[in-house]
Image (cartoon, rainbow, N blue to C red):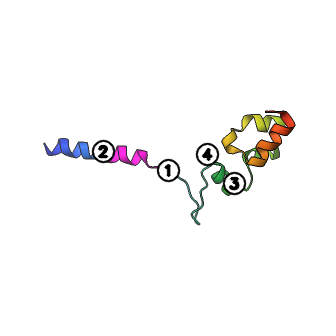
Amino acid sequence: MSLIISQAATEYQDSDSEKQPTEQTNEQGYSIDETTLTGFLNKYGMTPVSYKIQQGMSEDEAFRSTPRDMKMSGEIQYEYMEYGR
């Protein structure tokens, strides 16, 4: 009986820990999670679009391959003005 309760408690703890976000931070506590715009900026010092262009990708390709939620508002406006999308 205690084995069943122990297993249930372990499963509950495992499922509870999976729900908590695993945010990566540096020593100062700033997010460096590359999947968020803030984390990418903190880690690389530039936006994903800028980083891709610096690494040799064309501007058009960099804008197309970067999701909207990973662009700064100015990049979104520029893309709309320049490429109409």
> What are the residue bounds of the magenta stretch?
12-22
Is residue 56 in view from this perspective? no
* Residue 14 is a magenta residue: yes
What is the distance, in whole Å, between disc 4 and disc 2 at their CAs? 28 Å
Identify the residue position indicated by label 1 in the image: 22
- Chief secondary structure of the magenta span? helix
The magenta stretch spans residue 79 = no
Above or below residue 66? Residue 32 is below
| Left or right of 35 on screen, residue 7 | left
Q: Quadrant of residue 77?
A: top right
SS category of the residue bearing label 3: helix
Q: Tell me which numbered mark, 1 or 3, is placed earlier along the sequence.
A: 1
Residue tagged 3: 41
Tag 4 residue? 35
Element on which disc 4 rests = loop
**C-alpha gap between disc 1 and disc 2:** 18 Å
Quarter of the picture holding the C terminus:
top right
N-terminal-most mark, 1 or 4: 1
Q: CA distance from mark 1 to mark 4?
A: 11 Å
Q: Sort mark 4 into few (<14), some (14-19) or many (20+) by Cα contacts within 10 Å.
A: few
Amino acid type at image mark 4: Thr
Image height of 27 relative to 2, above or below? below
Dot 2 amino acid type: Tyr
Q: Residues within 10 Å of mark 3 (few under 14, many from 20)?
A: some
